[in-house]
Image (cartoon, rainbow, N blue to C red):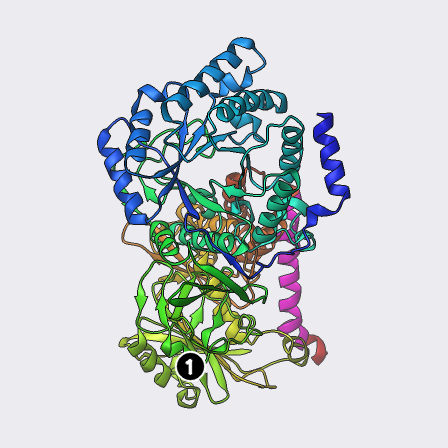
Amino acid sequence: MWPFIRANFAYMLSGKLRSKRGYQPVAGHRVPADFSGIGVATAANPAIDTYVIQQLKALGVRQVRLDFTYGDASNHVGRFLQTLCDDGFSVMLHLVQPFEAARNMQAADAQQQWQEFVADTLARYGDRIELLEIGSTINRKRWAGYTLQTFLTAWGLAHGEARTRKIRLAGPNITDFEPPYNIGILSILKSCGQLPDIHTDNLFSERCTEPERDDHKILGHRLAPLGGFRLVKKAFVLQEIGQHFGVPQLHSPAAFWTLPRIHRLLPDGEQKQADYLARYMLLCAASGALQRAGWGPLICHREGLIDDGVEDYPQLERITHYVSVLGSNFRIRPAFKAYQTFVAMIPGSYYEACLDDADGLEIHAFSHQDRLIHVAWTINGRVAALRDIYSAADLQAAACVSRDGEHLKQAPDFVTESPVYLCWPKGTHFEVNKHAALISDLAIHAHIAKCHFLYREGEWRGAILASDTDEFELLKTALNPDNIEAPRRDAILRKARNAIWTIPDPRDPAKKLVIKQPVHMHLHKKLLDRFKPSKGLRSWNGACELLRRGVETARPVAYLEKSGDRSLTQNYYICEYVDADFSAREIFSAFSKGESQYQGVSEEEMYTQLAEYLLTMHGRGVFFRDLSGGNILVSKGSDGRLEFSLIDTARAHFYQRGTILPKRIADLTRICNKLHAEGRNHFMNIYMDKLGKPFSLRWQLPFNIYNAKVVIKRALKGKALKRLFKR
């Protein structure tokens, strides 16, 4: 351990760990034609071999990584390896030592077994493979079984066999960004004369949620921006570590986003997996630090580009040993098409430049001999206007390709979290606004089943959600602020600080839209809200973020606001009308009066299903801040389940992880205000039980304080105060 520790102290004190290249890609390098890789496996049925080969060809990837362990030479894995080689694939053969064997590598018989396995494998396949990789997530002892010493023993034996046969060797296969392992191990291998030809590290970004974000696992969520350890910078750091010790080429053999991890916050798991794959591969290619980057398993339920329909997870993590394909009920995922598009567009290109360094907006330029490609995207939930980046003429001349390879009839209005490829003939000259940025404070739900259109007419700006261009033009005309009339008395739903009324839906007169406009602003609110987005925009953002996180709310249609409006009232939020059966306030009031049911819904049904809904909401990082009973609408589904929908979304706050318990309690105190004490305690016990916590006195106190606050507030506003002044 001392050489390991000493090497790390020396490297860190030299200041090299921060990397002088920062976190933005450096222009002027060629992306290797063989840049893209994929992890493959098969099953006992030979038909699976055929299917995998077909999908690899459809994907356009010729570089594969195959895990190979004791006994595989005589089973279906050996058969598949021969098939891959016969078909001309470049194979990185990843030798995986079984867990118990790795754990016992200090024993002479384990060492002999390993050396014989390596020698036999190389004698069989050494002249047919591209690379031999040794090391399997060695910084995860609970997965791989290695200590530092036992890994170095295994490495030394394999290194000798590879050098004897002049086979290119890759390793040590660190997983995630944990550079002390890279520094310490490469230093020891250099001192022993056992360096690999290729430095490998599974450069995951999954733990950061998004490829562009600072890694909070290093300095924590609050201090993460100080380190600036984003994907590109991490690639720079690892490449420089390899260069320092004499291994300049860096490969990331495997990375992926598992669907369960995505689903912690976002329900559109497969769409987000495709977004992350495209963005990860584009940043890896732009960095110039990686000679190759690969996705993990091609086929499996949790991480694969193809779902095999088997939800059972193997005992050993697939990043350590991708043993086999478990099922045969295959389904192509969006991530497959996203990777297919990347492979067709980027490998073999020249990286021209990063065209925008605005935080949250990425624009990268690549070129081939015949065409120029710009790829643009944003971080999750945010947008930029394409017309703020390119002129209308340049956008009209561009061939636009979606993340999944669909050729678009015209450029979209917005750059979103799903990358879009803009292509022009090589030599086309045009201006790019390098100061373009995200549209301030605007959030959208990119994977909703409609298109977002930019609204800019005269002094008015906003966004409209529509199925297609024709519907957008219809809504644009009908919702033009000049055409929005004062509400009829019979259409008014509420009129206090905000006016809320209904109008016929221009898309279907049998349905209604709801319009919300602020009409009265207290002086202190005028002062405070001057520094905030308009109420209309805040309502739109709240609704979009709720839907993006899988929490049902009234469906947004548009927001419109007047530029430079000092009154803060010239803005509208328009959403679809929710024809609910009742509100949570109504049913809770009924229970408080002693009723055991309300419209056929029992207390137990209401408490249990509402708790599930709110647990989902809070678990996905929502702090609603106005969770009164009147803002939760309830509909009775045909299957007996209750369907909940939130309204009045302007005050909601959102986080990148689950909402902390004190904020959850702050929400729940509001909704329980109308409940009797027994009902409140029962409802809260259901909610807290799901969190594994008791509804103790500590958490009961905020409810009592809030109830007292409401009583005092009503008294000050109501008849009691008037009687006092009369006296």
The secondary element bearing badge 1 is classed as helix
Residue of label 1:
392
Instruction: Please identify the quadrant where the C terminus is shown.
Output: bottom right
- Residue 463, x across and y down, in percent: 44, 75
Nearer-the-camera pick, 277 or 293 = 293
> Eyeballing the image, is 523 above or below 329?
below
Residue at 41% x, 84% y: name it.
489
Give the main secondary structure of the magenta stretch: helix
713 inside magenta stretch: yes
> Eyeballing the image, is 443 above or below 8?
below
206 inside magenta stretch: no
- Residue 34, x across and y down, in percent: 41, 47
> Eyeballing the image, is 164 above or below 693?
above
Q: Is residue 406 left or right of residue 242?
A: left
Residue stretch in magenta = 698-722
Q: Write down the quadrant of residue 580 in the picture.
A: bottom left
Residue at 41% x, 63% y: name it.
368
Nearer-the-camera pick, 526 or 594 = 526
